Image (tube, rainbow, N blue to C red):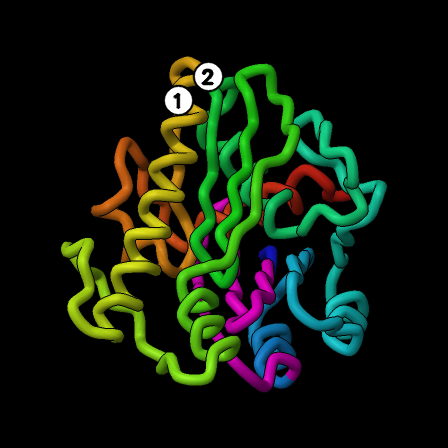
Amino acid sequence: MNLVLDIGNTLLKVGLFKNNNLISYSEFNEHYYDNIKYILESNVILYSVVSNVSKSESKLIELLSVRTQYICFDSSLKIPFYNKYKSKSTLGNDRLALVSSAVLKYPNENILIIDLGSCITYDFINCKNEYFGGAISPGLNMRYKSLNSFTENLPLLKPKLVNYIIGENTENSIHSGIINGIMCELNGFIDRYQNEFNEIKIILTGGDSKFLFKKIKNSIFANSNFLLLGLNFLIELNKKK
């Protein structure tokens, strides 16, 4: 079996794959080490990989390296596309995994992957299997938190979908500004890409994708396992023969 870990800014997502099928999925927000140790002791796992956009997890990596054949995100990693990104050393593991998953599912197509997580990332790969990059902006919850953190009087609110443009009080104005702002951004990006590239697929994934999906036009919803599928694909591509 393969063990894939996606360490984000808020959650650790864990997938167990057998014969390229996801057979187990878990989420943890703390006690990473003990939970992964238990999973390793309870299953026969041959390979593992970690996508980490959060803090360093050297103890966890050491555990995986001892118990499994650990696939490292370094310069020797084989990827299923031509990476034209100009600062490869700063390209997040999560973005590499998302593009790999898109290539696996939709080979030789123009694809824009939008990941709605702590940050919103946009990644484009063309029909020639070339990846150049995309864009990064603040995510949904980050926008709510920033208004509260960087002002004296604005409250911290929970995200709420709204249909109005005019907020008639402070709370409604915050909801309108953030929700309508994100929707204009997302749909604006989609329009720009569709105007520039023919026959482009728009893929949505990430923790907030289900929350916002119905308001985003011309898109395909991919569940939160989309990144995990890409990580498993990278294991299969990099297994020692």
Relative vertical location of residue 178 with respect to residue 121 in this rendering, above or below:
below
Q: Nearer the viewer, residue 235 or 169?
A: 169
Instruction: Write the residue at 49% across / 52% down.
Output: 120
Instruction: Write the residue at 79% across / 66% down.
Output: 65
Q: In which quarter of the image is the C terminus?
A: top right
Residues tagged 1 and 2 counted as in contact (Cβ below 8 A): yes
Q: Residue 197 carries which label?
A: 2
Dot 1 corresponds to which residue? Answer: 194
Q: Give the range drawn in magenta.
A: 4-33
Q: Is residue 81 left or right of residue 165?
A: right
Q: Is residue 182 visible?
A: yes
Residue farthest to the right, as pictured: 75
Q: Which of 73 and 22 is in front in this view?
A: 73
Instruction: Write the residue at 31% across / 35% down.
Output: 219
Q: Where is residue 129 in the image (x, y as percent from the top left)?
A: 61, 21
The three-letter code of the residue at mark 2 reads: Phe
Relative vertical location of residue 193 with respect to residue 39 in this rendering, above or below:
above
Q: Position of residue 61 (x, y in %)?
A: 76, 69
Residue 6 in the magenta stretch? The answer is yes
The three-letter code of the residue at mark 1 reads: Gln
Residue 143 occupies quadrant: bottom left
Q: Position of residue 112 (x, y in %)?
A: 47, 32
Q: Nearer the viewer, residue 72 or 133?
A: 133
Q: Is the magenta stretch mostly helix, strand or loop?
A: strand
Q: In which quarter of the image is the N terminus?
A: bottom right
Residue 192 occupies quadrant: top left
Q: In this view, does 165 lie to the left or right of 185?
A: left
Q: Nearer the viewer, residue 65 or 178?
A: 178
